[in-house]
Image (tube, rainbow, N blue to C red):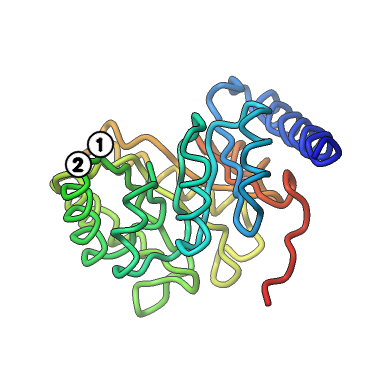
Amino acid sequence: MTDRKDELAVNLAKVEERIAAACVATGRKREEVTLIVVTKTYPASDVRILSDLGVRDVAENRDQDAAPKAAECSDLPLAWHFVGQLQTNKVRSVVGYADVVQSVDRSKLVTALSREAVRAGREVGCLIQVALDAGASGRGERGGVAPGGIMELADLVAGSEGLRLDGLMTVAPLTGEYAGRELAAFERMMDLSTDLRRTHPAANMVSAGMSADLEQAVAAGATHVRVGTAVLGVRPRLG
């Protein structure tokens, strides 16, 4: 366990250095950017180590893995973010532990989240997941709503009991006009965030950037970056 803690401490320090350097390069304050460590596929023991090392935000993308892990770590001072595509039949479980759902991309999901948040007596933060690669279907390859659908969903979240509209989330697209252009993609997200905040001023969170492109996200103005591999190491392949 000591070896693993040393490994995670070194990796975490490197990521912190990258975020700090990216902030300096763009004239931002380090405290403007929150690091969310994506702990998917890694055990609760790693989450405990990360908490000991000062991490306060962790993310998961599969409820079947996240629910027992969150329960095992319920004594820790952590905010849990759900970042995966969320099916409505998993909403009750996710609402039980997630402080923020970053992958809100359809009205049916908003309705389900609101119903379960009220039932559980909780307030759940919501980010609208934006698909910058959305095609004719209006959805992206990895979920998300097209930019043109943001405002309708945002208004629905804001008007739903038990939910709090926190802002926007995106993943750098692998196809379409922004493929390979991470900085441009994240700058587009900041424009969309500006538009959203005209109607919903408190929805100022922008979650963008991962291990490979966190610098571009910070440069564009992201408030949160989601980093997994750079902190925890290359994930084991799921059988």
Q: Position of residue 89 (x, y in %)?
A: 30, 70
Q: Is residue 7 left or right of residue 66?
A: right
Residue in the picture at 78% in, 36% down: 5
Residue 52 in the image: above or below residue 15: above
Question: Mark 1 belongs to which amino acid?
Answer: Arg
Q: Is residue 218 left or right of residue 142?
A: right
Determine whether the residue tagged by mark 2 lies in a helix, strand or loop: loop
Residue 108 in the image: above or below residue 157: below
Comparing 205 with 196, the one in front is: 205
Q: Tell me the crowding category of disc 1: few under 14, some 14 to 19, or many 20 or more residues within 10 angstroms, Cα based.
A: few
Q: Which residue is mark 1?
A: 198
Where is residue 181, by image quadrant?
A: bottom right
Where is residue 193, by image quadrant?
A: top left
Q: Tell me the crowding category of disc 2: few under 14, some 14 to 19, or many 20 or more residues within 10 angstroms, Cα based.
A: few
Q: Is residue 175 left or right of residue 19?
A: left
Going by the picture, which residue comes out furthest to the right?
A: 3
Count up the numbered dots: 2
**Counting residues from the N terminus, which is met first, the one under dot 1 or under dot 2?**
2
Q: Position of residue 199 (x, y in %)?
A: 21, 39
Determine whether the residue tagged by mark 1 lies in a helix, strand or loop: helix
Residue in the picture at 66% in, 54% down: 42
Task: Determine whether label 1 and label 2 are within 8 Å by CB.
Answer: no
Residue in the picture at 21% in, 50% down: 157
Q: Position of residue 87 (x, y in %)?
A: 35, 69
Comparing 145 with 124, the one in front is: 124
Q: Position of residue 3 (x, y in %)?
A: 86, 39
Residue 104 in the image: above or below residue 23: below
Q: Which residue is mark 2?
A: 121
Q: Nearer the viewer, mark 1 or mark 2?
A: 2
